[in-house]
Image (cartoon, rainbow, N blue to C red):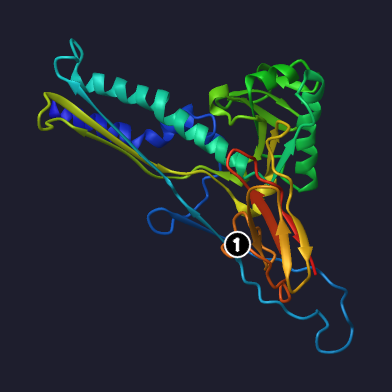
Amino acid sequence: MANEIFNLSDKFAAGMAKYFSANSFVKPHSNGKLDFDGVDTVKVYVPQTVEPIPYVREGMQRYGNPKELIPDVFIYHMTQDMAYSGTIDLGNSKSRTIGKATGEWTSAQMEQRIIPMVDRYALNRYAHQAGHAEALAGAITPETALKALDGARRHFVNHRVPLDGRVAFVTPEFNSMICDSKQYTEVEKLAVKAVTKGQVGQCKSFSIIEVPEDLMPAGLNFLAASKRAIVLPEKINELKLHDKPQGTSGVLIEGRHLYDAFVIGNYAEGVYACVNNGTTLAAPTFGGTKSATTITCAGGVIKYTLDGSDPRFSKSAKVYTEAFDATNAVKVRAYASAENKFSTDVVEKIW
């Protein structure tokens, strides 16, 4: 019996990542290309670019004044460290083997608890870190739903987001509003060999992923995303089975999940949230002088950078508390966030 239990543990633990991808609404559409630095930190290096200038045909700086190409560093800390445990008494396994009972319980735990927990958290994080949150003027209707999705398409085109890997996570209500459109192709008619879990159709260049309402953040109608822009890393996905725990006649099951969800900073415009009216903050505004720059916003915490990097993700971002000197700033960029509100777009000022 002991060998049976430990074989089950090894087999299931080894396949948990694959199992997760097959049953998650979010994981199959996320980017897995992140490297961990230490136990729970991810670093992403993004090269800076320079503005082209006219070539000068004489002198020593014909190509312009060289700029040191120091990459932006985006640092992500994994914060979700969750655990669970349970016992299956030998008597309660009844006519089944303890190994079969354990496998059934562990599968149910993943399907009913772990995967929904991770999906819910990921969608909430993506929506609140979106490069753009578009607030509707009023309640969404079948007449305005398709137009709202087209707004995401235009945003992606204008920000050069690749066609490949575009998805829209939608509520069932939103999907019912657009599925009768001639621009909506039902999944049965798509010329694909396999359909990703949750995909019900395609519309406006997006694969439509219908997500249960309890997984979607309040006030979010749909979330459009590029696969390269969102990540759902798992550092620890652990399962332990103890066949002789002290004080129990049966098996003790212990599981742990260390994970998080992030938007990649330089691809943030590849995440677009369509939200209800009144759920976003007004964008910050700049004031004062170059040597005493002020930033104001009605509510929320303001973060800013002076080196032109994205304050939502940059290592150099500072929390605004008082007027500051921007004399040597390359470009001042700022945004605001607040609990239970979708974040503002990044605004900037060049002196």
Picture layout, residue 39 above or below residue 173: below
- Residue nearer the viewer, 320 or 151: 320
Residue drawn at x 18%, y 14% as measured from the top left:
92
Q: Residues within 10 Å of mark 1 (few under 14, many from 20)?
A: some
- Residue nearer the viewer, 186 or 280: 280
According to the picture, the residue beneath numbered tag 1 turns out to be 317
Q: Based on the displayed image, in which of its 4 quarters is residue 290 positioned?
A: bottom right
Picture layout, residue 197 above or below residue 272: above
* Image quarter (top left, top right, bottom left or bottom right) of the C terminus: bottom right
Residue drawn at x 30%, y 35% as measured from the top left:
255
Residue at the extreme bottom of the image, as rendered: 59
Residue drawn at x 47%, y 28% as measured from the top left:
116
Q: Based on the displayed image, in which of its 4 quarters is residue 226 positioned?
A: top right
* Image quarter (top left, top right, bottom left or bottom right) of the N terminus: top left
Residue at the extreme top of the image, as rendered: 95
Amino acid type of the residue that numbered disc 1 sits on in the rendered structure:
Ala
Where is residue 241? Give x, y as percent: 22, 33
Label 1 SS: loop
Residue drawn at x 79%, y 43% as measured from the top left:
157
Where is residue 104? Give x, y as percent: 31, 20
Q: Based on the displayed image, in which of its 4 quarters is residue 137 positioned?
A: top right
Where is residue 213? Give x, y as percent: 57, 22
